[in-house]
Image (tube, rainbow, N blue to C red):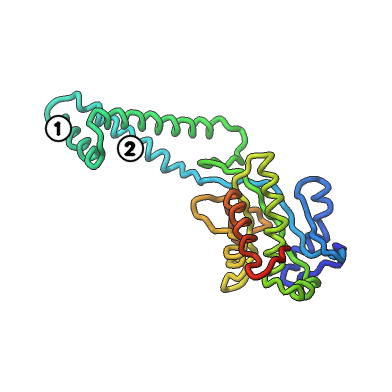
Amino acid sequence: MIKAFVNDKGYSLVNYLQTFAWKEDLDCHTAYYVIKSPANEIVLFFSLKCGALFDPLDEDIIEQRAQRAQELLKLVQSINSSGQEREFALQILEHFRSGQDISIEQLKRKIKINAMQAQQIWKQLNYDKNHEGNEQIIRVGHTYPGIEIVHFCSNDLIKEQWKSLNLNHPMGEVMFWQYIVPIICDVQKHIGCQYAFLFAADASEDGILINYYNVALKFEQPTEVGTNKPRYDLCCEFMCQEINQLKKHRQEYFDHFNPEDEMIV
């Protein structure tokens, strides 16, 4: 059945299914799934594996914040001086205090706390860089657990049968919301998992596939989070969405699936 699977546009995906998928699934490195029709033909295959997203960490900014915090702390300490140095310090603090409903004393405490925190983060970063034995470690701000949809490919041989059902919804779209999303949501019940993500292999000039994933499947292209991109996915576009939103979108999808009749897939 796998050898009979065809998708002209996704030839590389089909080749991966027919060449590597069986062993990867047996080794539990990637979980492969096939969705079959009532006639026992493969409609679509997809695969899932664990991954992680993260906020980037700019080490230069951390150092700059620590230095700036120390400068403000010195300014606070110079209030105890006399003459022009004291007057200058008070003017600067008043500038920072303006627009905030806090007193000079409260501002001073806030600056001291910020300076202590900034210095601690900078010291932790430098300590880790000097003591971590693995040079391949990439330091990031925060990490977010995720599930990657590695492959997502429909069978060209089934598309005419699908059209004959007159559902007015693309086959891959329905399969995604009906079968793939529940698996992702079930995994989230057992382990911490915040995002679902994928790499869209879109070689079109107008971004047809990216637009499809965005409009039909609700994946987005965020700029505030990132992930590691393997060589296999070079030239692909990273897209993701929060799993809690995925649940909401699935409910909305089927709430409006058949507005004119009672038939539900």
Circle nearer the N terminus (1, 2): 2
Residue occupying the point 75% across, 49% down: 30
Exactly how many numbered labels are in the figure?
2
Which one is nearer the viewer's eye here, 51 or 183? 183
Secondary structure found at label 2: helix
Q: In this view, does 94 lie to the left or right of 182?
A: left
Is the residue marked by circle 2 packed among few (<14), some (14-19), or many (20+) residues within 10 Å? Answer: some
Q: Is 41 drawn above or below residue 147 in the view shown? A: below
Q: Are marks 1 and 2 in contact (CB under 8 Å)?
A: no
Q: In which quarter of the image is the N terminus?
A: bottom right
Q: Which amino acid does label 1 sit on?
A: Glu
Q: Which mark is residue 87?
A: 1
Q: Distance between the residues labelled 1 and 2?
A: 20 Å
Residue found farthest to the top: 80
Q: In this view, does 49 lie to the left or right of 115?
A: right
Which one is nearer the viewer's eye here, 169 or 73? 169
Q: Position of residue 226 (x, y in %)?
A: 55, 50
Which one is nearer the viewer's eye here, 258 or 58? 258
Q: Is 26 drawn above or below residue 87 in the view shown? A: below
- The answer to whether residue 244 of the structure is visible from this angle is yes
Q: In which quarter of the image is residue 121?
A: top left
Q: Position of residue 122 (x, y in %)?
A: 44, 34
Q: Where is residue 237 in the image (x, y as percent from the top left)?
A: 59, 61
Q: In this view, does 241 lie to the left or right of 103?
A: right
Secondary structure found at label 1: helix
Residue occupying the point 58% across, 47% down: 53
